[in-house]
Amino acid sequence: MKKVLEVKDLSVSFHTYGGEVQAVRDVSFDLHEGETLAIVGESGSGKSVTVQSIMRLLSMPPAEFKSGSILMDGENIVAKSEKEMEKVRGQEMGMIFQDPMTSLNPTMKIGSQITEGLIKHQNMSKKDAHARGVELLKLVGIPNPETRINQYPHEFSGGMRQRAMIAIALSCNPKILIADEPTTALDVTIQAQILELLRELQEETKTAIVLITHDLGVVANAADRVAVMYGGKVVETGTVDELFYEPKHPYTWGLLGSMPKLNDDRMELQSIPGTPPDLKDPPKGCPFAARCPYAMKVCDAHMPEYMESSTTQKTACWLLDERAPKVDPPENIFAGGGK
Ligand code: SF4
Protein backbone atom coordinates (compact mmCIF):
# COMPACT_ATOMS: atom_id res chain seq x y z
CA MET A 1 0.00 0.00 0.00
CA LYS A 2 1.17 3.49 -0.85
CA LYS A 3 2.51 5.60 2.00
CA VAL A 4 0.39 8.74 2.32
CA LEU A 5 1.90 10.29 5.44
CA GLU A 6 5.26 10.06 7.15
CA VAL A 7 5.86 11.75 10.49
CA LYS A 8 9.60 11.81 11.25
CA ASP A 9 11.17 12.74 14.61
CA LEU A 10 8.49 15.36 15.25
CA SER A 11 8.91 17.50 18.37
CA VAL A 12 6.39 20.19 19.33
CA SER A 13 6.55 22.44 22.40
CA PHE A 14 4.29 25.04 23.99
CA HIS A 15 5.76 28.16 25.51
CA THR A 16 3.87 28.92 28.72
CA TYR A 17 4.43 31.25 31.70
CA GLY A 18 5.55 28.18 33.64
CA GLY A 19 8.15 27.22 31.01
CA GLU A 20 8.42 25.16 27.84
CA VAL A 21 6.07 22.18 27.74
CA GLN A 22 7.59 19.49 25.49
CA ALA A 23 4.25 18.00 24.46
CA VAL A 24 5.48 15.86 21.54
CA ARG A 25 9.01 14.45 21.56
CA ASP A 26 10.64 12.72 18.59
CA VAL A 27 7.46 11.10 17.35
CA SER A 28 7.69 9.01 14.16
CA PHE A 29 5.10 6.92 12.37
CA ASP A 30 3.71 6.41 8.90
CA LEU A 31 0.29 5.89 7.39
CA HIS A 32 -0.71 3.96 4.28
CA GLU A 33 -3.57 4.31 1.83
CA GLY A 34 -6.76 2.66 3.09
CA GLU A 35 -5.49 1.83 6.58
CA THR A 36 -6.54 3.01 10.03
CA LEU A 37 -3.84 3.89 12.51
CA ALA A 38 -5.06 4.38 16.07
CA ILE A 39 -3.05 6.58 18.41
CA VAL A 40 -3.82 5.69 22.01
CA GLY A 41 -2.70 7.02 25.34
CA GLU A 42 -4.04 8.82 28.38
CA SER A 43 -4.75 12.58 28.54
CA GLY A 44 -1.57 14.60 28.13
CA SER A 45 0.27 11.83 26.27
CA GLY A 46 0.62 14.07 23.19
CA LYS A 47 -1.79 12.27 20.85
CA SER A 48 -4.06 15.24 20.10
CA VAL A 49 -1.12 17.65 19.76
CA THR A 50 0.40 15.22 17.24
CA VAL A 51 -2.65 15.23 14.98
CA GLN A 52 -3.26 18.93 15.40
CA SER A 53 0.34 19.41 14.24
CA ILE A 54 -0.39 17.31 11.16
CA MET A 55 -3.38 19.54 10.37
CA ARG A 56 -1.37 22.61 11.44
CA LEU A 57 -4.19 23.66 13.75
CA LEU A 58 -1.98 24.80 16.64
CA SER A 59 -1.57 28.51 17.31
CA MET A 60 2.07 29.43 16.85
CA PRO A 61 3.03 30.88 19.30
CA PRO A 62 2.50 29.52 21.94
CA ALA A 63 3.16 26.26 20.04
CA GLU A 64 6.43 25.74 18.17
CA PHE A 65 7.73 23.02 15.87
CA LYS A 66 11.09 22.20 17.45
CA SER A 67 12.28 19.60 14.96
CA GLY A 68 11.25 16.87 12.57
CA SER A 69 9.02 16.74 9.52
CA ILE A 70 5.53 15.71 8.41
CA LEU A 71 5.70 14.45 4.85
CA MET A 72 2.61 14.09 2.71
CA ASP A 73 3.40 12.84 -0.78
CA GLY A 74 7.00 13.89 -0.15
CA GLU A 75 6.07 17.50 0.75
CA ASN A 76 6.84 18.80 4.22
CA ILE A 77 3.69 20.16 5.86
CA VAL A 78 5.75 21.91 8.53
CA ALA A 79 7.27 24.19 5.87
CA LYS A 80 3.97 25.17 4.19
CA SER A 81 2.51 28.66 4.41
CA GLU A 82 -0.92 29.19 5.98
CA LYS A 83 -2.38 29.79 2.51
CA GLU A 84 -0.99 26.49 1.23
CA MET A 85 -2.30 24.77 4.35
CA GLU A 86 -5.84 26.02 3.68
CA LYS A 87 -5.73 24.07 0.45
CA VAL A 88 -4.26 20.98 2.14
CA ARG A 89 -6.92 21.06 4.86
CA GLY A 90 -9.68 21.49 2.31
CA GLN A 91 -8.55 18.96 -0.29
CA GLU A 92 -6.03 16.53 1.15
CA MET A 93 -7.06 16.12 4.77
CA GLY A 94 -10.35 16.12 6.63
CA MET A 95 -10.94 16.13 10.36
CA ILE A 96 -13.71 14.82 12.58
CA PHE A 97 -13.77 16.27 16.07
CA GLN A 98 -14.96 14.79 19.32
CA ASP A 99 -17.96 17.03 19.83
CA PRO A 100 -19.77 18.03 16.63
CA MET A 101 -21.89 20.56 18.55
CA THR A 102 -18.83 22.70 19.19
CA SER A 103 -17.25 22.19 15.77
CA LEU A 104 -20.34 22.68 13.61
CA ASN A 105 -21.38 26.31 13.24
CA PRO A 106 -24.75 26.59 15.06
CA THR A 107 -25.77 29.63 12.99
CA MET A 108 -25.28 27.97 9.59
CA LYS A 109 -27.47 25.38 7.94
CA ILE A 110 -25.86 21.95 7.57
CA GLY A 111 -26.05 22.35 3.79
CA SER A 112 -24.00 25.57 3.78
CA GLN A 113 -21.35 23.90 5.95
CA ILE A 114 -21.05 20.96 3.55
CA THR A 115 -21.10 22.99 0.34
CA GLU A 116 -18.60 25.63 1.58
CA GLY A 117 -15.58 23.38 0.88
CA LEU A 118 -17.01 22.06 -2.39
CA ILE A 119 -17.49 25.58 -3.77
CA LYS A 120 -14.12 26.83 -2.48
CA HIS A 121 -11.85 23.86 -3.15
CA GLN A 122 -13.58 21.92 -5.92
CA ASN A 123 -14.81 24.98 -7.86
CA MET A 124 -18.36 23.61 -7.93
CA SER A 125 -21.35 25.79 -8.71
CA LYS A 126 -23.82 26.36 -5.84
CA LYS A 127 -26.33 24.06 -7.52
CA ASP A 128 -23.86 21.20 -8.04
CA ALA A 129 -22.47 21.60 -4.52
CA HIS A 130 -26.01 21.40 -3.10
CA ALA A 131 -26.69 18.21 -5.09
CA ARG A 132 -23.38 16.72 -3.90
CA GLY A 133 -24.27 17.76 -0.32
CA VAL A 134 -27.51 15.77 -0.54
CA GLU A 135 -25.55 12.79 -1.88
CA LEU A 136 -23.03 13.03 0.95
CA LEU A 137 -25.75 13.17 3.62
CA LYS A 138 -27.31 10.10 2.03
CA LEU A 139 -23.90 8.38 1.94
CA VAL A 140 -23.43 8.87 5.69
CA GLY A 141 -26.89 7.46 6.37
CA ILE A 142 -28.95 10.57 7.13
CA PRO A 143 -32.60 9.96 6.24
CA ASN A 144 -34.48 12.55 4.14
CA PRO A 145 -31.26 14.30 3.08
CA GLU A 146 -33.16 16.74 0.81
CA THR A 147 -34.94 18.13 3.89
CA ARG A 148 -32.11 17.69 6.37
CA ILE A 149 -29.66 19.69 4.27
CA ASN A 150 -31.74 22.81 4.98
CA GLN A 151 -31.73 22.33 8.75
CA TYR A 152 -29.49 23.69 11.50
CA PRO A 153 -27.21 21.54 13.71
CA HIS A 154 -29.54 21.86 16.73
CA GLU A 155 -32.25 20.08 14.72
CA PHE A 156 -30.00 16.99 14.41
CA SER A 157 -29.48 14.31 17.09
CA GLY A 158 -25.93 13.74 18.45
CA GLY A 159 -25.35 10.75 16.15
CA MET A 160 -26.68 12.64 13.11
CA ARG A 161 -24.45 15.63 13.88
CA GLN A 162 -21.43 13.32 13.93
CA ARG A 163 -22.58 11.82 10.59
CA ALA A 164 -22.88 15.36 9.18
CA MET A 165 -19.33 16.11 10.42
CA ILE A 166 -18.12 12.99 8.59
CA ALA A 167 -19.92 14.17 5.43
CA ILE A 168 -18.18 17.57 5.69
CA ALA A 169 -14.79 15.96 6.34
CA LEU A 170 -15.20 13.63 3.35
CA SER A 171 -16.72 16.21 1.00
CA CYS A 172 -13.50 16.90 -0.92
CA ASN A 173 -12.36 13.23 -1.04
CA PRO A 174 -9.39 13.69 1.33
CA LYS A 175 -6.48 11.24 1.25
CA ILE A 176 -6.28 11.42 5.03
CA LEU A 177 -9.06 11.63 7.57
CA ILE A 178 -8.15 12.53 11.12
CA ALA A 179 -10.70 11.46 13.70
CA ASP A 180 -10.03 12.87 17.16
CA GLU A 181 -12.07 10.84 19.68
CA PRO A 182 -14.95 10.73 17.14
CA THR A 183 -17.24 8.56 19.25
CA THR A 184 -16.46 9.67 22.80
CA ALA A 185 -19.54 11.92 23.10
CA LEU A 186 -21.89 9.22 21.74
CA ASP A 187 -23.68 6.32 23.40
CA VAL A 188 -22.40 2.82 22.60
CA THR A 189 -25.04 1.94 19.98
CA ILE A 190 -24.43 5.11 17.98
CA GLN A 191 -20.67 4.66 18.56
CA ALA A 192 -20.82 1.25 16.86
CA GLN A 193 -22.84 2.70 13.96
CA ILE A 194 -20.34 5.54 13.42
CA LEU A 195 -17.36 3.15 13.49
CA GLU A 196 -19.14 0.87 11.01
CA LEU A 197 -19.89 3.87 8.79
CA LEU A 198 -16.24 4.96 8.83
CA ARG A 199 -15.18 1.42 7.89
CA GLU A 200 -17.66 1.26 4.99
CA LEU A 201 -16.65 4.69 3.68
CA GLN A 202 -12.98 3.77 3.95
CA GLU A 203 -13.51 0.62 1.88
CA GLU A 204 -15.14 2.73 -0.80
CA THR A 205 -12.77 5.70 -0.81
CA LYS A 206 -9.43 4.11 0.36
CA THR A 207 -9.00 7.11 2.67
CA ALA A 208 -6.32 6.60 5.32
CA ILE A 209 -7.57 7.30 8.84
CA VAL A 210 -5.69 8.45 11.92
CA LEU A 211 -7.92 7.65 14.86
CA ILE A 212 -7.20 9.27 18.21
CA THR A 213 -8.78 7.47 21.11
CA HIS A 214 -8.28 6.43 24.71
CA ASP A 215 -10.80 3.61 24.25
CA LEU A 216 -9.15 0.26 23.48
CA GLY A 217 -12.57 -1.18 22.55
CA VAL A 218 -12.72 1.34 19.69
CA VAL A 219 -9.16 0.40 18.69
CA ALA A 220 -10.03 -3.31 18.54
CA ASN A 221 -13.07 -2.54 16.36
CA ALA A 222 -11.69 0.04 14.01
CA ALA A 223 -7.89 0.03 13.68
CA ASP A 224 -5.34 -1.90 11.62
CA ARG A 225 -2.29 -0.61 13.46
CA VAL A 226 -1.76 1.12 16.78
CA ALA A 227 0.75 3.63 18.15
CA VAL A 228 0.80 3.87 21.95
CA MET A 229 1.88 7.28 23.25
CA TYR A 230 3.14 8.15 26.71
CA GLY A 231 4.82 11.29 27.99
CA GLY A 232 4.93 12.86 24.50
CA LYS A 233 6.60 9.80 22.94
CA VAL A 234 5.48 6.77 20.97
CA VAL A 235 6.46 3.89 23.25
CA GLU A 236 5.09 1.00 21.19
CA THR A 237 3.67 0.42 17.70
CA GLY A 238 2.29 -2.70 16.10
CA THR A 239 -0.68 -4.27 14.40
CA VAL A 240 -3.88 -4.52 16.43
CA ASP A 241 -3.26 -8.26 16.97
CA GLU A 242 0.31 -7.63 18.16
CA LEU A 243 -0.80 -4.95 20.59
CA PHE A 244 -3.66 -7.02 22.02
CA TYR A 245 -2.03 -10.49 22.01
CA GLU A 246 1.74 -9.82 22.13
CA PRO A 247 2.13 -6.43 23.87
CA LYS A 248 5.71 -5.78 24.97
CA HIS A 249 5.67 -2.42 26.77
CA PRO A 250 4.68 -2.25 30.46
CA TYR A 251 2.55 0.85 29.73
CA THR A 252 0.62 -1.08 27.05
CA TRP A 253 0.21 -3.86 29.66
CA GLY A 254 -1.18 -1.25 32.06
CA LEU A 255 -3.64 0.08 29.47
CA LEU A 256 -4.85 -3.44 28.65
CA GLY A 257 -5.06 -4.31 32.35
CA SER A 258 -7.29 -1.30 33.00
CA MET A 259 -9.87 -2.46 30.43
CA PRO A 260 -12.98 -4.02 32.00
CA LYS A 261 -13.23 -7.75 31.14
CA LEU A 262 -16.45 -9.71 30.80
CA ASN A 263 -15.14 -12.65 32.86
CA ASP A 264 -13.61 -10.46 35.57
CA ASP A 265 -15.52 -10.60 38.87
CA ARG A 266 -13.40 -7.96 40.63
CA MET A 267 -15.57 -5.05 41.73
CA GLU A 268 -12.97 -2.33 41.09
CA LEU A 269 -11.54 -1.24 37.77
CA GLN A 270 -7.76 -1.47 37.63
CA SER A 271 -5.75 1.70 37.09
CA ILE A 272 -2.07 2.47 36.57
CA PRO A 273 -0.77 3.92 39.85
CA GLY A 274 1.02 7.28 39.68
CA THR A 275 0.73 10.27 37.38
CA PRO A 276 2.19 11.11 33.97
CA PRO A 277 5.51 12.99 33.86
CA ASP A 278 5.71 16.77 33.94
CA LEU A 279 6.54 17.65 30.34
CA LYS A 280 8.05 20.99 31.41
CA ASP A 281 10.88 18.88 32.78
CA PRO A 282 10.54 15.48 31.12
CA PRO A 283 12.58 12.58 32.42
CA LYS A 284 15.94 11.98 30.76
CA GLY A 285 15.31 8.26 30.48
CA CYS A 286 12.12 6.26 29.95
CA PRO A 287 9.07 8.51 30.55
CA PHE A 288 7.21 5.61 32.23
CA ALA A 289 10.00 4.80 34.71
CA ALA A 290 8.33 6.47 37.74
CA ARG A 291 5.21 4.29 37.33
CA CYS A 292 6.75 1.13 35.96
CA PRO A 293 6.90 -1.86 38.32
CA TYR A 294 9.79 -3.33 36.28
CA ALA A 295 11.98 -0.19 36.15
CA MET A 296 15.73 -0.78 36.34
CA LYS A 297 18.63 1.62 36.95
CA VAL A 298 19.21 2.09 33.23
CA CYS A 299 15.58 3.18 32.68
CA ASP A 300 16.05 6.45 34.60
CA ALA A 301 19.36 7.21 32.98
CA HIS A 302 18.77 6.47 29.28
CA MET A 303 15.78 6.53 26.94
CA PRO A 304 15.54 3.06 25.36
CA GLU A 305 15.91 2.74 21.59
CA TYR A 306 13.10 1.09 19.63
CA MET A 307 13.51 -2.66 19.54
CA GLU A 308 11.83 -4.68 16.82
CA SER A 309 9.91 -7.85 17.66
CA SER A 310 8.58 -8.17 14.10
CA THR A 311 8.56 -6.13 10.92
CA THR A 312 5.52 -4.27 12.27
CA GLN A 313 6.08 -4.16 16.05
CA LYS A 314 8.53 -1.76 17.70
CA THR A 315 8.85 -1.11 21.42
CA ALA A 316 10.92 1.39 23.37
CA CYS A 317 11.63 -0.57 26.55
CA TRP A 318 14.84 -1.81 28.17
CA LEU A 319 13.11 -5.10 29.04
CA LEU A 320 13.63 -6.13 25.42
CA ASP A 321 17.38 -5.74 25.73
CA GLU A 322 19.10 -9.14 25.81
CA ARG A 323 20.83 -8.23 29.10
CA ALA A 324 17.51 -7.49 30.89
CA PRO A 325 15.80 -10.05 33.14
CA LYS A 326 13.00 -11.95 31.41
CA VAL A 327 9.59 -10.57 32.42
CA ASP A 328 6.26 -11.97 31.20
CA PRO A 329 3.22 -9.72 30.84
CA PRO A 330 0.69 -10.02 33.67
CA GLU A 331 -1.96 -12.67 32.86
CA ASN A 332 -4.92 -10.43 33.73
CA ILE A 333 -4.29 -8.12 30.76
CA PHE A 334 -5.60 -10.65 28.26
CA ALA A 335 -9.33 -10.88 27.62
CA GLY A 336 -9.63 -14.50 28.75
CA GLY A 337 -7.28 -14.10 31.72
CA GLY A 338 -4.37 -15.54 29.74
CA LYS A 339 -2.99 -15.62 26.20
FE1 SF4 B 1 9.69 0.11 32.48
FE2 SF4 B 1 12.25 0.48 31.98
FE3 SF4 B 1 10.68 -0.49 30.10
FE4 SF4 B 1 10.49 2.04 30.81
S1 SF4 B 1 12.24 1.07 29.84
S2 SF4 B 1 8.81 0.66 30.50
S3 SF4 B 1 10.87 1.90 33.00
S4 SF4 B 1 11.19 -1.45 32.05
Image (cartoon, rainbow, N blue to C red):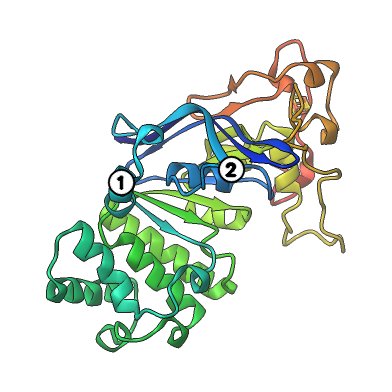
Front-lying residue, 91 or 313:
91
What residue is shown at x 45% (from left), y 68% (from top)?
194
Quarter of the image with the N terminus in it: top left
Judge left or right: residue 270 versus residue 215. Answer: right
Query: Helix or strand or loop: what does disc 2 sit on?
Result: loop
- The picture places residue 32, in percent across and down from the top left corner, at 36, 38
Dot 1 amino acid type: Lys
- Would residue 282 be seen by someone viewing this image from the given angle? yes
- The picture places residue 321, in percent across and down from the top left corner, at 70, 15
- Would residue 325 be seen by someone viewing this image from the given angle? no
Residue that carries the numbered disc 2 in the rendered image: 62
Question: On the image, which quarter does residue 69 sit in?
Answer: top left
Label 1 or label 2, whichever comes before in sequence order: 2
Tell me the CA gap for discs 1 and 2. 20 Å
Dot 2 amino acid type: Pro
- The picture places residue 200, in percent across and down from the top left corner, at 34, 61
What residue is shown at x 34% (from left), y 78% (from top)?
110
In this view, 191 is above or below 111: above
Residue that carries the numbered disc 1 in the rendered image: 83
Question: Is the residue marked by circle 1 packed among few (<14), some (14-19), or many (20+) residues within 10 Å?
Answer: few
Judge left or right: residue 21 versus residue 309. Answer: right
Query: Helix or strand or loop: what does disc 1 sit on?
Result: helix
What residue is shown at x 41% (from left), y 80% (from top)?
107
